[in-house]
Amino acid sequence: MVGGECYSNAPILNASSGLGHVMNIGGVNSYVTGSPLALLAILLVSDVYGFKAPLLRKIADKVAATGYYVLVPDFLHDDPYDPKNLTRPTPVWLKDHEPGKGFEEAKPIIEALKRKGISAVGVAGFCWGAKIVTNLGKAKLIQASVLLHPSYITVDDIRGVNVPIAVLGAQHDKLSPPTLLKQFKQVLKAKPEIDSYVKVFPNVSHGWALRYDPKNPKAAKAAGKAHKIMIKWFDKHLKKVRNLVM
């Protein structure tokens, strides 16, 4: 279950942030950035605060600058979690936004990308979004996956993933503590046919890769390292698929 750490450091949402634009793909409004001529696509699945978070869009723009067509789908349908809304407690909000719904909505998005000519798709999920990523990985609907400070994820979820997976966790994280990530690593080690990578970042807390303070050099540096690992992971696995197709 998503815990209190998921809701800390709430961002100031801005629908006009980022270098890209919003368009409907596969029935879901998505922030889109990068060249529409790219053959490789990456979906970034948000945390509970949704696709209008400026830092999430900044990350999407950063990934797009490396040659990818990047989408940030609005799986929350313009209904991000609002910690100030006391009339709608967390359990009620979560019931309306079970990750299983996002998994089903991701399918037509991926189909639309393939019809567009995309040869390989990678998906990264932050916090709440991680469950959607593992579900897609279990179904082998994508070619590579990355989880950043995940919540909702169990050992069985990791065991079921059938595509390359990288898990980036925090030293200080009650939702996915280092002990749990160690179990993830052991489970993945038992599946050598699936390329995997598990790393615990020292001296950071849950949400460090997305809800960091860009004015804090240490925080920005730690987040930047996570983003670089994510991009390199996609480079390794998506470009290999593209080359096979070409």
Image: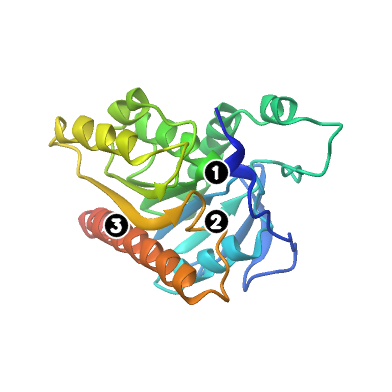
Q: Secondary structure at mark 2?
A: strand
- 3D distance between C-alphas at marks 3 and 2: 17 Å
Tell me whether the residue at label 1 lies in contact with that at label 2, contact meaning CB atoms closer than 8 angstroms: yes
The residue that disc 1 covers is: 109
- N-term-proximal mark, 3 vs 1: 1
Q: Say which mark, if any, is on residue 71.
A: 2
Q: Earlier in the sequence, mark 3 or mark 2?
A: 2
Q: Are marks 3 and 1 in contact (CB under 8 Å)?
A: no
Q: Residue at x 39, y 72 (%)?
A: 66
**Is residue 117 something one can see in this rendering?**
no
Which three-letter amino acid code belongs to the residue tagged 3? Answer: Trp
The residue type indicated by label 1 comes to Ile
- Residue that mark 3 sits on: 233
Query: Measuring 61% from the left and 38% from the top, which residue is drawn there?
Result: 4
Gap in Å between the C-alphas at discs 1 and 2?
A: 10 Å
Residue 189 makes an appearance in the image? yes
SS at badge 3: helix
